[in-house]
Image (cartoon, helix red, strand yellow):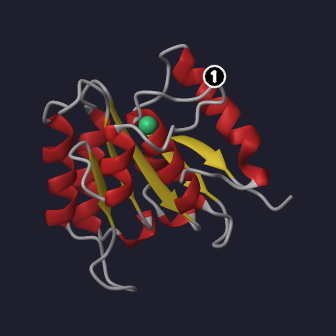
Amino acid sequence: MSAIYPWQQEQWRLLKARNDKGRLPHALLLTGMDGMGKQQFASALAQALLCRYRDSEGFACGACPACERFQAGTHPDFLPVTPGDEGKAITVDMARAVSEFLVLRSHYEGSRIVILAPAEAMNVAAANSLLKTLEEPAPETLLILLASAPGALLATIRSRCQQIKFVLP
Ligand SMILES: [Zn+2]
């Protein structure tokens, strides 16, 4: 399911309010120490945005066809990007796959969403490729980057994302 942690409610409400107004940015950078549940939050957000029947707090219903596909890892409008192995880099080929994915049309007339984590794992070529995607975002897309050490990212990437910080309660 798409639960978030108790200390993430403020960030959730902020993004829900923006989404309700149709003003969600094209790129989010979720930051905070490991163990803060960034992945959980990003996943809950992605599922909620793809869900057809969100509840009043903005959470996914967990039961519609979009939710079923998301939970099965087969939703065609969602792409998770991580290094092949822990400690390995996110390569330029992976970054290019992100751009190619985001310019396709949605299968369900909704958003297309990418979660890329950890963002610091991008090598220089990947970061430069992703920067082009950030500079010319396709409509109805959301790129969610996760980073526990955002200072390690290119400043130009950071500046094109809305940063959502998670701090210990
Ligand atoms: Zn649903």
Q: How many marks?
A: 1
Quadrant in the rendering for residue 122? bottom left
Residue 67: where, in percent of width, then height? 39, 44
Residue 14: where, in percent of width, then height? 67, 30
- Which residue is located at x 44 percent, y 42 percent? 63
- Which residue is located at x 78 percent, y 52 percent? 6
Which image quarter is the C terminus in? bottom right
- Which residue is located at x 25 percent, y 62 percent? 126
Q: Which residue is mark 1?
A: 17
Residue 10: where, in percent of width, then height? 76, 39
Secondary structure under badge 1? helix
Establish if 122 lies above or below 5. below
In the image, 114 versus 65, the foreground residue is: 65
- Which residue of the protein is positioned furthest toward the right in this rendering? 169
User: Is residue 159 in view from this perspective?
Assistant: no
Left or right of residue 44, residue 64 in this image: left
Residue 101: where, in percent of width, then height? 17, 45
The amino acid type of the residue labelled 1 equals Ala
> Label 1 neighbourhood size at 10 Å, few (<14), some (14-19), many (20+)?
some
Establish if 141 lies above or below 152. above
Establish if 89 lies above or below 65. below
Left or right of residue 2, residue 102 in this image: left
For disc 1, does the CB lie below 8 Å from ligand 1? no
State ligand 1's quadrant.
Answer: top left
- Which residue of the protein is positioned furthest toward the front in this rendering? 63
Establish if 19 lies above or below 65. above
User: Is residue 163 in view from this perspective?
Assistant: yes
Left or right of residue 96, residue 4 in this image: right
- Which residue is located at x 30 percent, y 77 percent? 89
In the image, 23 versus 8, the foreground residue is: 8
